[in-house]
Image (tube, coloured by chain):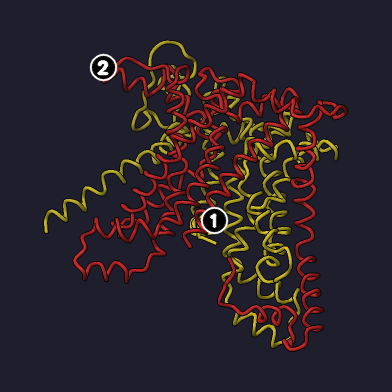
Chain colours: A red, B yellow
Amino acid sequence: MQNAAEPRHFRRTVVQGQATSRKQPSMFNANKVREGLIALAFLAPSLLGISIFFLVPFADTIRRSFYDVRVVNFIGLESYSSVINNTAFRLAAANTAKFVAVCVPLLLLISLTTALLLRSIKPLGRIFKTSFLLPMAVPVASIVLLWQAMFNYGGIANGVLVWLGFTPIDFMATSSAFWVLIFTYLWKNNGYNMVLWLAGLDGISETLYEAARVDGANSFQAFRYITMPCLLPTVGIVTILSLLNSFKVFREAYLVAGAYPESDSIYLLQHLFNNWFQNLDISRLSAAAAMLAAVLLGIILLMRRTLDVDE
Amino acid sequence: MWTNKIIHILKFIPLTLLAFLVWWVLWFMVMGSLMSLEELTGTIGAAISGEGGYSSWPLLPAWPTLQPIAELLLDTPQFFVMFWNTFKLVIPSLVGQLVFAAPAAWALSRFRFRGRKLLVTVYIALMLLPFQVTMVPNFIVIDRLGLMDSIWAVILPFAFSAFPVFIMLRGFDAIPRALLEAAAIDGAGAFRTFWQIGLPLGVPSILAAIVLGFLEIWGAVEQPMTFLKTPSNWPLSLFLPQIVAEELGFAMTASLFMLLPAALFFFFGQKYLELGIQSAGVKE
């Protein structure tokens, strides 16, 4: 994160705006304290805010997950077992897991392909790049109408299918809804991931490829033995960000299909959280949020560790 | 040699197909806004009302008309209320992000103190957790402060978002040390160094945070849906999906006009948008 080549004492000098003698330990400590205080002054407003709105209430959320709804009686792990045994939770968790397991690898593959193709056609690359990024700027609410016009039973997609002589599909009421949602996720996030891949690809030194070319490697070999290993660290961060962006498909699913979608296949954890919130089922919601946080932080830590090992 | 040329041309096929999927959406919205209500009902009415038949979409409207757009802009004060509601959420949130995130990012980037690494990890974790995890914590505080159903219930959590801190941290890290050295020689204090060197040189990352923040908050659905109960406070993102079934023409033009501010930010800020995405991706 920070520039490792930069000697530590230099920063202190800069911060204080005066020369520092490294030979005097007492000075050294006093400066360190002073630097910490200045840093605290800069950080205070933000720290106060995240403590009030996120950190402290998160601790309270975990506490509440062990109490009943009125936060009076300690009920231990009851909320947790109630969540785990809840049929709606199981359905939602299974759907979410399936969604992530399908959409993340698909997105990684498609966006990497897009990035590689884009790099190899330099002159028109700019226009394509803009095109692929554009979905990021399209608010979900703006495409609700288009979605319905496309995928409702009497929609354009079925119009085309019928015209081609196929039987129409009830996209929103059957398990096809799941694939429509996958498609939306890919459509929305391809550009975002492409930029991450491009940054990773730009970080690979050109001299490696030149050396390989001199040694007579073809472009496939160059990809296999240079591009792939060098991209490994990027894979970790792209996976984490893709996973977290996958939670945002709730917007599309909810705005188009409502709180209880006609098709069970797109009833996700996000729907469940929202519905429990509407019913003010705070104990179970707290337990579910604690578990979701634990799973996600676990995945992030795991991915981070693989990154560190590669270094 | 000609095989290489063919391969080169073949590469355009998948890229063009993908680009088509994006441009089709914009084409749909622009052309739909130029259609009279009769034509719109004739083309996609079947999908929205569910009454027999299938929808189709013409390449161009049969009789293009500016009437739907004129109606939206002149006859529907309701639309402007929702449009303005959205800005009332976006602007204070972005101002808050700048005021709180910039100094915090500067401290994390330029000072070395105990607990710095831990703090950076906390910010990263907060940045990566989805709304569903922070929903209950936010609700507990908002409820305690009596802010439920007020616009501050949406603004404050956005204002303290960890995301801009992270982006600006990356930007400040990239400032060459020689400049800070010069400031130190000139005797600039910590606050002057931040104000006169840090902020001006951090502008690209600050803009990146603004562009990404704008797109995020402009289209936000979960937060206003959870914390705003009174429909008169609603932003466009909640209002729009409700009117699709009843007022097709209105929904069409309103969709386009909701997209416009985001599209403007995108076209003028694409460079910074990319920078913002990259700063999340570059390895620590």
Camera-side residue of B31 and A100: A100
Q: Quadrant of residue A200?
A: bottom left
Residue B24 relative to residue A4: left or right? left
C-alpha span from label 2 to label 1: 47 Å
Please tell me which residue lies in front, A114 or B269: A114
> Is the residue at mark 2 from the same chain as the one at mark 1?
no
- The x, y position of residue A285, in whole percent, is 71, 29
Q: Position of residue B7 (x, y in %)?
A: 19, 51
- Dot 2: within a 10 Å radius of its alpha carbon, few (fewer than 14), some, or many (20 or more) residues? few
Viewer-nearest residue: A157 or B235: A157
- At mark 2, the secondary structure is loop
Residue closest to the far top? B52
Residue B203 found in image quarter: bottom right
Q: Quadrant of the N terminus of chain B?
A: bottom left
**Which residue is denoted by mark 1 in the rendering?**
B280
Circle 1 SS class: helix
Residue type indicated by callout 1: Ala
Residue to which mark 2 is pinned: A165
Tell me which residue sits at (84%, 29%) in the image: A74
Q: Which-is-in-front pick, marks 2 and 1?
A: 1
Q: Residue at x 85, y 40 (%)?
A: B145
